Image: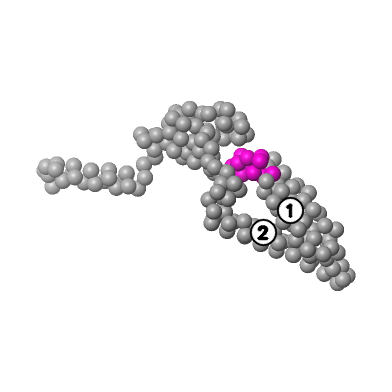
Amino acid sequence: MWQDMFDAGISYGEKTLRTVLVYLALLVLLRVIGKRGLAQLNTFDLVVMLLLSNVVQNAVIGNDDSVTGGLYGALVLLATDWVLVRQAARWNWFNRLLDGTPTVLARDGVYDRRTIARQGIRVADLDVAVRHQGGDAIGETSLIVLEPGGTLLVKLKEGDQVADKADVAALRAALAAIEARLPAGPRGY
């Protein structure tokens, strides 16, 4: 029993190579399928991600059910990710290669339907993003961008933006100035 828990079954060199290759292959595959998979993780996408992890498990650890083999595979995965993330932060070109660039989905209140279709995003999902930002419809937007990490960025037109704390403070100051100019009423108001 103890032997099976700690005997890796394959060499650690092979396990390292397998893990790094699978990591890089998944990175390329996820990059190729686009940002949409990250932008809208719905039930179908979650099922795919869970099954994907199970499918590549044997490719990572080989014919190994040991605790040490699994932990070693996890360590190599985390170390590989750590190295690539640090390099992406260091070199802009490498970051663009790994993550891609932002994609404009709408400009000046008009959807770019060809780009939306290419990204595999539903217009209904973009309409929801506009409402989350405080807009009522696409016509109130100046820009909608799908960021490399999958985040939808919605910028509303100037007059359609939701008031923020600075806007409220400016209104209060204007009201106070108006009140200060009003003559006092019969009751001292």
Start-end of magenta stretch: 29-43
Classify 98 as above or below 87: above
Graded by Cα atoms within 10 Å as few (under 14), some (14 to 19) or many (20 or more), the crowding at tag 2 reads: some
Quarter the N terminus occupies: bottom right
Q: Nearer the viewer, residue 101 or 131?
A: 101
Residue located at (70% from left, 53% from top)? 23
Left or right, 177 with respect to 150, comes to: left
Residue tagged 1: 21
Q: Nearer the viewer, residue 148 or 185?
A: 148
Secondary structure of residue under mark 1 = helix
Residue 50 visible, this orientation: no
Left or right, 1 with respect to 59, comes to: right
Graded by Cα atoms within 10 Å as few (under 14), some (14 to 19) or many (20 or more), the crowding at tag 1 reads: some
Secondary structure of residue under mark 2 = helix
- What main secondary structure does the magenta stretch of the protein show? helix
Left or right, 94 with respect to 179, comes to: right
Q: Where is residue 65 in the image (x, y as percent from the top left)?
A: 83, 61
Residue 95 visible, this orientation: yes
Quarter the C terminus occupies: top left
